[in-house]
Amino acid sequence: MKKFEIEKDPELEELLLKAKKRGLKFGLALGGGSARGLAHVGVIQVLEAYHIPIDIIAGTSIGSVVGSLYAAGASIDQLEEAALSMKKSKTLFLIDLALPHSGLISGKRIEEMLNDLALEDKTFDDLKIPFAAVATDVESGAEVILNQGKVIDAVRASISIPGIFTPVKYQDYFLVDGGIVDPVPVDVVQKMGADIIIAVSLARINPYTTVLMIDKETGHLKEIENLEDLKINKEENPKFRDTEKIASSVDEEKSILKQTIEQVKSKLEGPNIFEIISQSIDIMEAKITDQCLEEADVVIVPFGIKEINLFDFDKAEMLIKGGIMATMINIPEIKRAIKEKLRE
């Protein structure tokens, strides 16, 4: 992949020098989002290129993968090489099916790959950068911050998408994907002592979702522009004004329903189980992502992530470039955040 070039930014260099003298710590909160998380590599590339320090890292799901590898000492070139090597065949190889009791994939092959890259036998004390992974206790729904013991165990818990990966037993708890409760762990980075927080959000669903209802004329779903549309107007609705038309109206509704059923049947091949689970989690996470980002000083949303599905790891080059572009555009925001902290 062709290396990008940056222009020197004397203003940023001066601000970073002042921040260093003040002892300000930069924290990086890497959000979850399956294959979309390869964009994190591009984000880190730009931060490195501008010599913006990464003093603290917290990651959720795929964010914990990229974050832990970087914290363990993997170079940005190693991360990029690993990401670009993720062809379809390799992705399929990493899917080691389990007996479908609590998850479809055991995750053992993914653990082996991460160990080979940088995590083998690493504990949190061995890391070059303070790091924490976020998981969820499947029984209580509590957020679990993992920052002790073996790093690979924490990462494996953080990536355990419910229904897809088997949960990880940790002491008396069963842990799953941290994105369920904390999609972008800004709060964790803050608790770890970060003064300036850069958050990377991979949410691809608009949290302010629209409301759809069946149109009475066409039988198709349509967007409701005004919730008042849900109210029945007896004066305008012929079903209430003219009872003699009820029978024919029912026939029409039955006909429309039949057509709708046929349309659904023709599309039954539709999304597979992985896509259904992934999309469901995306929708749920989108509802709480905005809240997670409230305390971030800078929020980066990589370009090109909306069309990326769960296992689209073969689109690494596009995703890395999306992370690079989004971070470059946010350099003025990073400068603004530093200025604000220096004024405090």
Image (cartoon, rainbow, N blue to C red):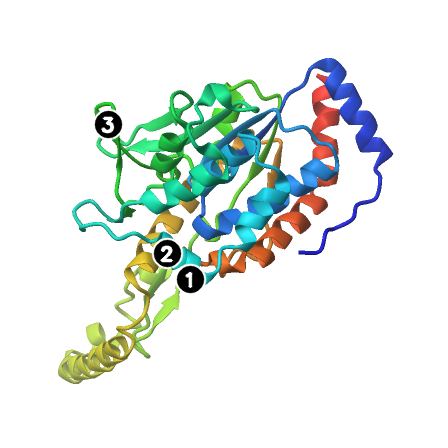
Mark 1: secondary structure:
helix
**Residue type at tag 2:** Phe
Return the x and y of residue 268 as percentages of the image width and height: 26, 73
Residue occupied by mark 3 = 173
In front here: 331 or 3? 3
Residue depicted at x 43% and y 30%: 133
Residue occupied by mark 1 = 89
Residue occupied by mark 2 = 93
Q: Earlier in the sequence, mark 3 or mark 2?
A: 2
Q: Residues within 10 Å of mark 1 (few under 14, many from 20)?
A: few
Residue 75's disc is: none
Return the x and y of residue 339 as percentages of the image width and height: 75, 26
What whole-number distance in Å separates the C-alpha atoms at marks 3 and 2? 29 Å
Which quarter of the figure is the N terminus placed in? bottom right
Residue depicted at x 48% and y 56%: 313
**Residue type at tag 3:** Tyr
Q: Is residue 91 left or right of residue 77?
A: left
Q: Residues within 10 Å of mark 2 (few under 14, many from 20)?
A: few
Which quarter of the figure is the C terminus placed in? top right
Residue depicted at x 54% and y 30%: 71
What whole-number distance in Å separates the C-alpha atoms at marks 3 and 1? 34 Å
**Residue type at tag 1:** Ser
Return the x and y of residue 289 as percentages of the image width and height: 46, 40
**Looking at the image, is 184 positioned above or below residue 192?**
below
